[in-house]
Amino acid sequence: MEKIIAIKSVGSTLLALAFWVLASVLGAAVHADTVEPAMVAIAHPATSDETISRVSLRAIFGMRLQKWPGETATKVFVLRDESPEHATFSKSLLQVFPQQLRMAWDRQVFSGQGQYPEQLGSTQEMLSRVASTPGAIGYVKASEVNPNVRVLKIR
């Protein structure tokens, strides 16, 4: 009789634990949808587009798309490869690993079909250069955006 009570007690404890884990996961998923993205793509304020497809964003940062829809040349700015922001941007917004991005740049340069994006040393420099360069595109943490640049919504 004691074994049956102990088994029921363990079973209900496991059931309660399973419900707690499920509630935690669902709560985190709901919370994750309401949190603003860690990184955002930014562009020169005169850029006509307010939204950009993820495919176009990848093509621009992969140095395969050199013009905006209005025929303005793109100028791509990135942070250094070892920057945590660069890795976060690559993985979260472009949905590629930073090494894949680097390989795409190398392929373009070594084949004579393209050039590397300009690497910058800080987010302040990124904000300044994107704001002052027509056709420019880059990225920063969402919390560091200033009114001098346009945030691009990704569709």
Image (cartoon, rainbow, N blue to C red):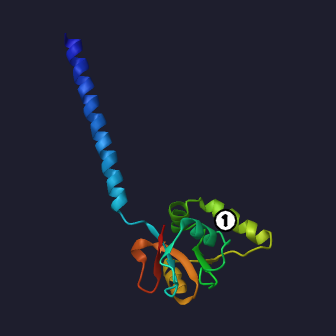
Give the x, y percent position of residue 97: 59, 59
Residue identifier under label 1: 102
Query: How many numbered discs?
Result: 1
Residue furthest right as drawn: 111
Question: Residue at point 69% right, 74% down?
Answer: 116
Quarter assignment of residue 117: bottom right
The foreground one among 66 and 126 is 66
Q: Which residue is nearer to you in this view: 120 or 49?
A: 49
Residue found 22% across the figure and 23% down from its top:
9
Q: Where in the figure is residue 40, as x and y percent of width and height?
A: 47, 71
Q: Quadrant of residue 22?
A: top left
Position of the N terminus, as image quadrant, is top left
Question: Neighbour class for label 1 at 10 Å: few (<14), some, many (≥20)?
Answer: some
For label 1, the SS is helix
Q: Position of residue 74 (x, y in %)?
A: 62, 81
Q: Is residue 17 left or right of residue 120?
A: left
Question: Is residue 20 placed above or below 102 in the rendered structure?
Answer: above
- Seen at 66% across and 78% down, the residue is 66
Closest to the observer: 65 or 71? 71
Residue sitting farthest toward the front: 70
Residue drawn at x 46%, y 81% as measured from the top left:
150
Amino acid found under the numbered disc labelled 1:
Arg
Residue 16 percent across, percent down from the top left: 25, 33
